[in-house]
Image (cartoon, grey):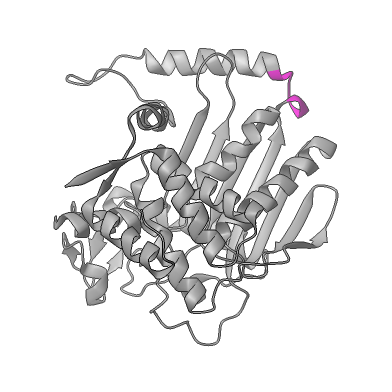
Amino acid sequence: MYKIYSYSTLHSFAQNIFLKIGCSNEDATIAADSLLIADLRGVDSHGVARLSGYVRLWEAKRINTVPQIKIVHETPSTAVVDGDAGLGLVVAPFAMQVAIDKAKNVGTGWVSVKNSNHFGIAGSHAMMALKSDMIGIAMTNASALVAPTFSTERMLGTNPIAVAIPAGNEQPFVADFATTTAANGKLEISQRKNEDVPSGWVQTKTGEPSTNASELKNGGALLPLGGDKEHGSHKGYALGSIVDIFSAVLSGANYGPWVPPFPAYVPMPENMPGEGIGHFFGAMRIDAFRPAEEFKLHMDKWIRAFSSSKTVEGQKKVIIPGEPEVEFENERRKNGIPLLESVVEDLKRVGNKFGMEL
């Protein structure tokens, strides 16, 4: 069911595909880095399984592989970046670096992005701040697959939020989550495995609960975090809305039901109010609040306290956000990355287009 590939093999393959579609050497490397970190960290829905989707977007002339990414408005601590329809995998690291550079100068940096595309996992961009002893924040809106609480209409994307916080001797705290009960990529994995999904992930086109992993193809919708009102879906709806507004209404990107879809075969929305997909990034220097070493000492204490807290029966320990991903990365760098056979076949088809073998 699975085939194992080394990180270097998959990275080289993805990098060469990005070169084939016209990326520069630098951008191809950045894009492959951004893509493969998802596979390393166990977020299989957003790694090389998405590679063919980016190629299809390029074929549909919706991705510019030689973008002139630029700042179009700024203050000492803020900026708006125009991604020039580039790969989000490349636009996002550029914008996050702008936020980090501004934080170095004035303590914090905040960057909103327009005219971009799908940027992979939010956590990879937020984590860029860690090596500078900063807290990193990353979020993005996405194509409308989510029905707000009490609605049958798709109005929001899965709209993830990531926050990366440095520690001292402990691993960083890295929260990276969709504002839906499950990301669309989880549905895609269940479809490949021909499995049902848990209740609370999706609803039918008339708003009834469903466990069909293909429900979106039938006109259904993903559900906000919480699943239903009784379990707090109004809070998930609010979180997704915040991401949409920060990422797009603030930058001039498309928002709500007008966000461009990731599948290239899905028609673009009519009367789009903005440009491309939107992102939002933040960087905060720890020493703008307290000495960095002192903060990291207390983050270590915080992490250890939570890790050692009493657990319910049958559970070994409380998990710190980012901890499972570190375990995945250590394992997969050593023993390789497992890919479903359907993903392998998809990658082989992509390679065949450009005369390349996986």
- Quarter of the rendering containing residue 112: bottom right
Q: Is residue 143 above or below residue 35?
A: below
Where does the magenta region start and end? 287-292
The front one of 243 and 51 is 51
* Residue at 85% across, 48% down: 76
Vertical comparison of 88 with 326: above or below: below
Q: Position of residue 188 (x, y in %)?
A: 27, 59
| Quarter location, residue 319 | top left
In the rendered image, is residue 143 in sight? Answer: no
Q: Is residue 187 left or right of residue 173?
A: left
Q: Residue furthest bottom?
A: 271
Q: Is residue 81 left or right of 260 when viewed as pictured?
A: right
Residue drawn at x 79%, y 43% as measured from the top left = 102
Q: Position of residue 156 (x, y in %)?
A: 44, 66
Q: Is residue 105 visible?
A: yes
Is residue 222 a member of the stretch shown in magenta?
A: no
Compared to residue 116, the image places residue 92 above or below, namely above
The residue sitting at 47% across, 46% down in the picture is 11
